[in-house]
Every structure is written in C-alpha cells, then in structure tokens.
Image: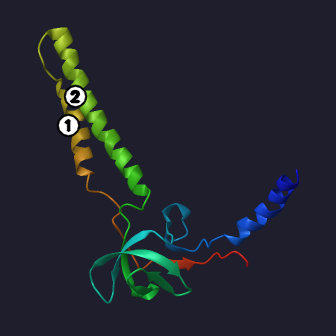
Amino acid sequence: MKSTFLFLLLFPISIFTFAQSKDFLLLKRGTNVRSQIRFYPGEQITYKSTKLGYYVTDVIKEFSDDYVYLSENILSLNDIEAIAIRKKDRRNGTLTAFNSLILGAGVILLTVDGLNSVYHEGEFSIDKGVGITGGILVGTGIAMLPLRYKTFKNQGRNKLQIIRMRLPD
C-alpha cells in the first residue's frame, strides 16, 4: 500500500521532469489551418537556401527564436527560399485518393460493359457512350497524376514561423 501511494505521488512529478519542448516550424499560407504544415525536431526537411540555390536534405535538431538548427547547418528563416512538402502535405493524400477514384471508375466502367457484352452477346464489345465516358475518366485520371503540392515557397502570402512552446521548469 505504501509503495502504491509513493508511486502515485512521484509519477506526476517525473512526467514534468522529463517533458520535452513542443517547438515546431510552421509553414502557413493565409489563416487556413488545414493548409498549415509542421516540422518538428528530429524530422527530415528538404529546403532550398538563398545562399546555396539548390535543395538540401537535413535533420532538424532544435529551434531558437530566429534560427533552425540542423545537423549540418544553421538556417535563418529569411535564408529559406523553398521547402519540399511532397511527402508532408496531407492534401497530396486527398489528391491521390481522388485520382485513384477517377481512374478506378473509368477502368471499372469499361470492364463491366465489356464483360456484360460478352455475357449477353457472346462477343466483346463496348458501347460508344460507355467507351467515351470511360475514356474521359481514365484520361482525366492519367492527366491528374502529376498534380501534387511539391514545394512551399517563402514569398507572398506564404509565411515561415517558429513556434516555441516550452513547458515551465
């Protein structure tokens, strides 16, 4: 009983002693929360610096008020020209799902009409209207494949901001 009481007394204290910061780099466009992207310490970031002119991949170590400390570099927010967000932006998942839906609908439409004609008429044929509709769906799906949010450019309405959320000592 005494050990349980001691554990319940000391456990909350130990949580606060091992608490880490929740600092992050916020990429935002306007005020829409859905289009905000966050990078936390320990994550990989691919960025293009105004000083280098090409993309570099590095790991975020920590943040200060104006600087991002990486494993190989120290960056000011003003030095970041663009950040690659292809894997990080959740809107790309929505685009991929929508693209798969359109491609799948076109392929299923053409397949079902072809199988239906084989079943009813004994030979493979596709109705003209179904062929046009299925072709438009497949063509639209293929045309949408390269559409993705690839980079976040630090200009205009786009803003980079370091958010520091330290717990009190």
Seen at 40% across and 69% down, the residue is 44
Disc 2 and disc 1: Cα gap in Å? Answer: 8 Å
* Label 2: which secondary element: helix
Q: Residues within 10 Å of mark 2 (few under 14, many from 20)?
A: many
Q: Residue at x 26, y 45 (%)?
A: 141
Q: Depth check: 25 or 71 in front? A: 71
Residue 64: image location, x then y, percent: 55, 85
Total numbered badges shown on the rendered structure: 2
Image position, residue 75 (x, y; %): 42, 86
Q: Could you say where residue 78 lies in the image, as x and y percent from the top left?
A: 43, 87
Residue displayed at 24% across by 33% down: 107
Q: Which residue is mark 2?
A: 110
Q: Is 38 above or below relative to 77?
A: above
Q: Tell me which amino acid carries mark 1.
A: Gly
> Which amino acid type is shown beneath numbered disc 2?
Leu
Between 158 and 8, the residue placed more toward the observer is 8
Q: Is residue 81 above or below residue 125?
A: below
**Quadrant where the C terminus is found in the figure:** bottom right
Q: What's the mark number on residue 135? A: 1
User: Where residue 2 sits: x, y (%)?
Assistant: 88, 55
Mark nearer the N terminus (2 vs 1): 2
Q: Which quadrant of the figure has residue 106? A: top left
Q: How is the image coloured?
A: rainbow
Marks 2 and 1 in Cβ contact (< 8 Å):
yes
Q: Where 76 sits versus 15, above or below?
A: below
Q: On residue 111, which mark appears?
A: none
Instruction: Give the residue at x 76% y 61%.
Output: 11
